[in-house]
Amino acid sequence: MKIQPLGDRLVVKVAEVAAEKTKSGLYVPDTAKEKPQEGEVLAVGPGAFNDKGERMPMDVAVGDKIIFSKYGGTEIKIDGEEYLVMSQRDILAKIN
């Protein structure tokens, strides 16, 4: 990856959503689906500083699967691929 997040930020590849088919056989277009809230961590910043000037370690690592807030992160595009850059506080949980 060509991007290194700063502070308590991380880069996430959002999970792909498979084409959804209704019981009647209709396919739901991507624009009608909810935005996925799961992804894989691809890059992690060094962590934020606390009030004493000490760097706080990140709670996630590269390769972790996470669930993040619905409107968390900033969408970016690198080499035609879409990613999210988000703060650690936008992470709701890790998936084991």
Image (cartoon, helix red, strand yellow):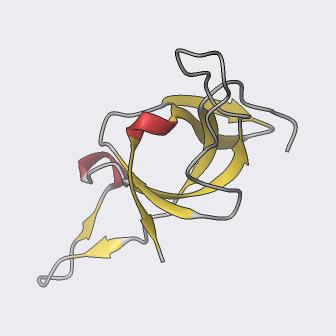
Relative vertical location of residue 21 with respect to residue 32 in this rendering, above or below: below
Position of residue 50 in the picture relative to residue 18 (left or right): right
Q: Position of residue 62 (x, y in %)?
A: 71, 57
Q: How many marks?
A: 0
Q: Position of residue 18 (x, y in %)?
A: 43, 71
- At x 73%, y 45%, the residue is 43
Residue situated in front as seen by the camera: 76 or 96: 96
Determine which quarter of the picture holds residue 36.
bottom left
Position of residue 72 in the picture relative to residue 4 (left or right): left
- At x 61%, y 21%, the residue is 49
Residue pushed farthest right?
2
Q: Position of residue 31 (x, y in %)?
A: 31, 46
Q: Position of residue 2 (x, y in %)?
A: 87, 37
Residue pushed farthest left?
24
Tell me the quarter of the image containing the N terminus.
Answer: top right
Residue situated in front as seen by the camera: 25 or 73: 73
Relative vertical location of residue 9 with respect to residue 22 in this rendering, above or below: above
